[in-house]
Amino acid sequence: MLQTPGQVRRQWKDLAVFGAPPAFASPLHVGRPNIGDRARFLDRINGILDRAWLTNDGPCVKELERRIAALAGVKHCMAVCNATIGLEIAIRALDLSGEVIVPSFTFVATANALHWQTIRPVFADIDPNTHNLDPQAVERAITPRTTGIVGVHVWGRPCAVDALAGLARRRGVKLLFDAAHAFGCSSAGRMVGRFGDAEVFSFHATKVLNSFEGGAIVTNDDEVAHRVRMMRNFGFAGYDSAVHVGVNGKMTEVCAAMGLTSLESFDGFVAWNRTNYDLYRRELDGLPGVSFVEYDAAERNTYHYVVLLIDEAQTQISRDRLIDVLHAENILARRYFYPGCHRMEPYRTLFPNAASVLPATERLARQVLSLPTGTAIGGDEIRTVSSILRLAIENGPQVSATLDGSASVSVANGA
């Protein structure tokens, strides 16, 4: 909850980073779970307990799969326990090996899902305008050892799906999309989920649609779907016949119940996000050196991320110093996806020269600032966050110089 109005910041020296009480009594996170209709969820839980069917493709999982497939416009949906397992299973189902091209500007699980299976992730640069894989950079990275491309729909803004699909066909490689950000989003009027050989959604607790933990693999390819279904259930093709190496990647009934409940409120969650996004735009309008990641109004998007790009040359205060300012106020803004996978282990040791071919990734990783949003955040919180940001940036040189002289202040690690 907000502190009393008397603690509103009027001068830059009043910021919490210089010793004042924080603007928020408890942390304001970038993403808190959307809960939906609690009574409806508990009713589903009672049904699960009455049936005593807790896992192994129960009716809640089957219903969620049907509804996800219908919304994405695909033939097959296989729910999984989380999106990382989903990526690993999809990679196996597509028989990827050798080298696979991925962006470095993504959550590290995208690269880890490959490396975990002894596949070499080859990092290609992004388009600085879309923040997604640059198809030309991908083509330059293809070698005789390349078997696939994994694109990531960052912020829910789809990749250049047609260009990547044409490239994959021409070069004879598979195309998989990490769609963790992009459930409910569209490209040229086509819903995310139907692109490439398969796509993987995340229904993690912080996503617009959540199932506590969970995800789904979607595809229009019958053979890929068949392999996925076997691989997520220990490789069983029948009641007692294992015909493939597999894992336990199944979603539980309780998680599916949350997914179904979340799905029923999905449009309301998106509308709330859109309201938050528009208010941030109004509150921060005209602030020098600050630009927003924008969404195409002609497409469907969830507005799940409020992302600013900080141009330090204009703000005269770095993105990381702004993080210091916000964190001191209990506003836990994030540096997605800092510093880039290529600068995390084991990749920085395996590929020490990767940064030389990733200039757009390097630049973007220093600029991104993601702000709190979601149904836990409303107008009062947004106006307070925005006023603190505005105060810090309008007094950027003074705030930065004072912080640079303080040994007690340092940006929080992690992204």
Image (tube, helix red, strand yellow):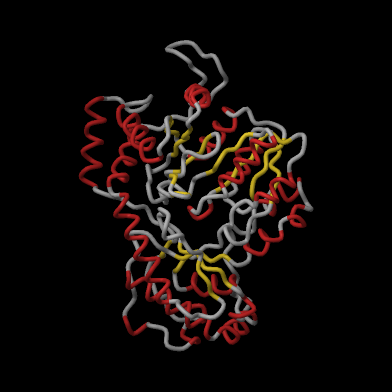
Q: Give above or below for 225 relative to 69.
A: above
Report the residue at 57% width, 77% height from top.
289
Q: Position of residue 48 (x, y in %)?
A: 26, 30
Q: Give above or below for 146 relative to 15.
A: above
Q: Position of residue 409 (x, y in %)?
A: 59, 74
Report the residue at 46% width, 61% height from top.
295
Q: Give above or below for 388 relative to 67.
A: below
Q: Position of residue 348 (x, y in %)?
A: 73, 51
In which quadrant of the rendered image does the N terminus lie?
bottom left
The quarter of the picture where residue 284 lies is bottom left
Residue 415 in sight from this viewpoint: no
Report the residue at 37% width, 25% height from top.
57
The quarter of the picture where residue 365 lies is bottom right
Decide which of 152, 409 is in the foreground and name it.
152
Residue 81 in sight from this viewpoint: yes
In which quadrant of the rendered image does the C terminus lie?
bottom right
Decide which of 318, 216 is in the foreground and name it.
216
Query: Is 352 left or right of 49, judged from the image as shown?
Result: right
Number of numbered discs overlaid on the protein picture:
0
The quarter of the picture where residue 47 lies is top left
Q: Position of residue 88 (x, y in %)?
A: 57, 34
Q: Give above or below for 330 relative to 218.
A: below
